[in-house]
Image: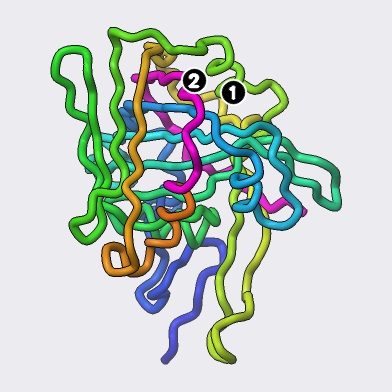
Amino acid sequence: MSYTRDDSRMYQMPVHFGPCVTPRQNPQGQRFIYDQATDLTKHTIVYETDPDQLSALLPQGFTLTAPYVIINMNMLRNIAWLAGHGYNLTGVSVPVCFHGKQGDVEGNLLLVMWENHADPIITGREQLGYSKIFASIDDIHTYGTVSKTALTSWGFRFLELDFDSSVQPAYPDELKAVLNNPNSKGIMHYKYIPHTGEGFTKADVEYVCLNPKAAKLPDDVKKYPADELTYMGGQVRWNIPTWEDMPTQYHVVQALGGLPVKRILGAVRSVGYTLGDLYGQTVIE
């Protein structure tokens, strides 16, 4: 007898074995938010680039609100939905406004996110619409006041990030304004899943997703201390690959690495906890 899918539960391929565990569903079908919080160490760096070149990377319906590139490098540890395991991620986003049928929505558009484990990539792409792909991501390592990390693919080191806590941000007010935009509604994503067959050039799914900043956890979830912030200086180095260096991602890094770094506004380290499971992710039109 064939199985019957329970439409009250979450599934991912392969669906044949029953409901799956994701950041938003535990083995019993409940949310993980009442379990332990994730330890989060985030390093963020912001730099100004050429607005015309940056605008060329935006999908239809988006306009650039400021010519900045925001790079986040997150180390997540003691993750409940991974039974205490952890992973690293690096996301590249830009400040935008989406002009939809229901009005304008301002926020940051995530252009790409690299992660160093398959599980968060699969759940994030399929459920949330994140533009996630794989890379090897070094843990942040610190000697003295300098912290470093690097991303590699097939042995090619394509992105290097340095942070120095002995140096103050060059443009601290501008940095804080970019990272704390009061008009931002959250993080936006452009979800695209191709149709099978017929040349694989059509879309089965194509729409904009929003992780709303206003989304809140239930009131009875345990509260944790506010993040500790340290503002600092930083450096960014993109190394431009050929197709042979990064066969399926070279075009991503060529585009991002080809953006001029006009001014580095500065960087910030954030150390704290997160229980956010992005359950409030929604589609905007």
Can residue 233 be seen here? The reply is yes
**Is residue 264 placed above or below 285 in the rendered structure?**
above
Q: Is label 2 in a helix, a strand or a loop?
A: strand
CA neighbours of label 2 inside 10 A, class few (<14), some (14 to 19), many (20+): many
> Foreground residue, 170 or 98?
170
| In the image, residue 265 lies in the stretch drawn in magenta | yes
Residue shown at 21%/36% (left/top)?
Answer: 139
Q: Is label 1 in a helix, a strand or a loop?
A: helix
Residue 109 image position (x, y, % from top left): 60, 43
Amino acid type shown at disc 2: Leu
Residue named by callout 2: 265
Residue shown at 31%/33% (left/top)?
Answer: 161
Residue 203 image position (x, y, % from top left): 63, 75
**Is residue 246 placed above or below 281 in the rendered structure?**
below
Q: CA distance from mark 1 to mark 2?
A: 10 Å
**Left or right: residue 219 compared with residue 141:** right
Q: Quadrant of residue 217?
A: top right
Which badge, 1 or 2, is on the more N-terminal residue? 1
**Left or right: residue 246 compared with residue 6:** left
Circles 1 and 2: CB atoms closer than 8 Å: yes
Amino acid type shown at disc 1: Val
Can residue 24 be seen here? The reply is no
Residue 260 image position (x, y, % from top left): 49, 39
* Quarter of the N terminus within the rendering: bottom left
CA neighbours of label 1 inside 10 A, class few (<14), some (14 to 19), many (20+): many
Question: What segment is highlighted magenta in the picture?
Answer: 257-285
Looking at the rendered structure, which numbered label has been put on residue 178?
1
